[in-house]
Image: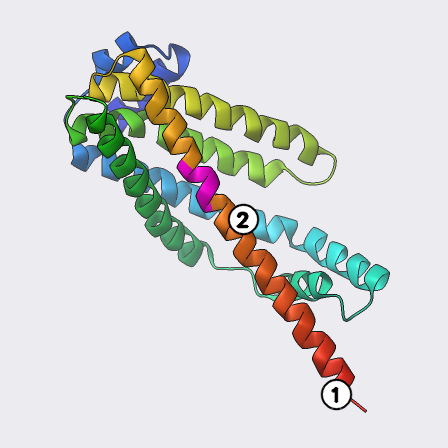
Amino acid sequence: MLQAMFQSSMAILRSPRVETFEAHERDDLKSATIYVAVAALISGVLGAITYRVHLPYLQEQAAQMQEQFGGDNPFGQMMAAMSQQAAPSMLGGAVSNVITTLIGFFIFLGLAYLLGRGFGGTGVFGELAYDISLFYAPLSVAGAILNLIGIGPLACLTGLGGLALFFYQLFLTYVGIQSGLNLPKDKALWVVILLGVIGIVVITMFAAAVAAFLVLVGLASGAAGAATP
């Protein structure tokens, strides 16, 4: 089953057209879930290896930031704390990645399905899940590999590669929605645009929460320093 799905993935990645998706399309939610879970497991192991490989660089960056801005700088403190943590075990990182990836996958699928049905789509959920999994799984592993090698002078190149991968996945989502939900091009485009808007809102809210947390950490550090005689 996994071998057949991988072959379908390669066919779609080589020829990302509606006709290619429909030639390999199946109403099989179970297989789609297993395929994405296996890819998430591989990505999780690669993520744990990435942390171990990048740990010395994180420690160096934290030391430079604390030296430049002082030990009370909240950004430096945060990076120092991150670099001092023990690298996660491969098993723990992989299992955690499987859970979070599957949750994210089904949230994305649910939104795409509801939006597509709202625009008149007639496809079933299992078909959409199968279509999306055929490119979501291999591209998630490709992204993990880019993160692994993205260190030092290669970081700029892998960053550009990650950006290209994102836009390619966006395009494949557009084509996959046409096939999985039986939507015309214009309506599938609206579904992708709305998904993008929702994603931007979520990312913005997360960034605002992180910024607020850092401000609170800075205020707490300043108050503690002022209270110290």
Q: In this view of the protein, which residue sits in the foreground, 41 or 115?
A: 115
Density class for disc 1 (Cα within 10 Å; few <14, some 14-19, many ≥20) is: few
Q: In which quarter of the image is residue 13?
A: top left
Q: In this view of the protein, which residue sits in the foreground, 167 or 120?
A: 120
> Which label sits in the foreground, 1 or 2?
1
**In magenta segment, residue 29:** no
Q: Is residue 96 visible in the rendered structure shown here?
A: yes
Q: In this view of the protein, which residue sits in the foreground, 122 or 156?
A: 122
The amino acid type found where label 2 is placed reads Ile
- Percent position of residue 44, x then y: 43, 47
Which badge, 1 or 2, comes first in the chain's sequence? 2
The amino acid type found where label 1 is placed reads Ala
Q: In this view of the protein, which residue sits in the foreground, 136 or 223?
A: 223
Task: Determine contact: label 1, label 2, CB under 8 Å.
Answer: no
How many angstroms separate mark 1 from mark 2 (CA)?
Answer: 42 Å
Which residue is rendered at x = 54% and y = 48% of the image? 49
- Percent position of residue 132, x then y: 30, 27
Q: Which residue lies furthest to the right in this view?
A: 68
Q: What number is the disc on residue 227?
A: 1
Which residue is rendered at x = 40% and y = 26% of the image? 193
**Does 214 sit above or below residue 58?**
below
- State which region is magenta: 198-202
**Does 65 sit above or below residue 200?**
below
Which residue carries the number 2 mark? 49
Quadrant (top left, top right, bottom left, bottom right) of the C terminus: bottom right
Quadrant (top left, top right, bottom left, bottom right) of the N terminus: top left
Q: In which quarter of the image is residue 16?
A: top left
- Percent position of residue 27, x then y: 14, 26
**Does 212 sit above or below residue 169?**
below
